[in-house]
Image (cartoon, rainbow, N blue to C red):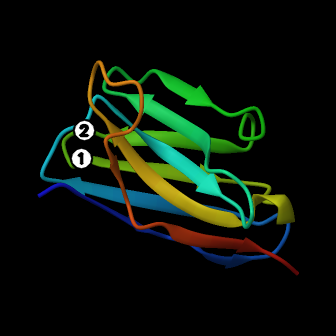
């Protein structure tokens, strides 16, 4: 059974930092990453990283967020700096197998709230 389990969400003040972690079990993925979904909006890509450490970032994440991966532990982290209220969303960990166009597996989501 494939599972992606996120941790690290919470409430942070504007300008603050959070680190999200995701642990995968039951499968190894070519591509792991993070998506987010704000209330009333579609889920959008935040950042992904491949087994070869190729990284993709959404424009809003560039310069503020950093994705990293530990292949041995099958984990992926998202370091988020300079958080703003518009970053408030549920953040989902994702896993994608090579050759598939979209993620095959999702975590349950972790809430990130940026407010003073």
Q: Secondary structure at mark 1?
A: loop
Side of 50 relative to 44 (left or right): left
Q: Nearer the viewer, residue 19 or 108?
A: 108
Which residue is more in the foreground, 60 or 96?
Answer: 96
Q: How many marks?
A: 2
* Residue at image mark 1: 74
Tell me residue 27's x, y (percent): 15, 44
**10 Å crowding of disc 1: few (<14), some (14-19), many (20+):** some
- Pick the quarter of the image with the N terminus: bottom left
Q: Residue at x 12, y 52 (%)?
A: 26
Residue 86 x/y as whole percent:
83, 59
| Contact flag, marks 1 and 2 (Cβ < 8 Å) | yes
Query: Which residue shows up at 18% across the image and 39% down it?
Result: 28
The residue that label 2 is drawn on is 71
Q: Residue at x 73, y 44 (%)?
A: 64
Write down the quadrant of residue 100 in the picture. Answer: top left
Q: Nearer the viewer, residue 115 or 92?
A: 92
Question: Which type of secondary structure does the marked residue at label 2 adopt?
Answer: loop
Along the horizontal axis of the image, is 80 left or right of 85? Answer: left
Q: Which mark is residue 55?
A: none
Residue 83 figure quarter: bottom right
């Amino acid at each position: 059974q494939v599972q992606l389990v996120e941790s690290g969400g919470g409430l942070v003040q504007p300008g603050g930092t959070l680190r999200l972690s995701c642990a995968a079990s039951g499968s190894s993925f070519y591509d792991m990453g993070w998506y987010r979904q704000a209330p009333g909006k579609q889920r959008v890509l935040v950042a992904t990283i491949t087994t070869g450490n190729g990284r993709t970032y959404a424009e809003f994440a560039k310069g503020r967020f950093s994705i990293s991966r530990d292949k041995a532990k099958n984990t992926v982290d998202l370091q988020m700096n300079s958080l703003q209220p518009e970053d408030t969303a549920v953040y989902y960990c994702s896993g994608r197998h090579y050759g598939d166009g979209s993620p095959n597996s999702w975590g349950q989501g972790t809430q990130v709230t940026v407010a003073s």
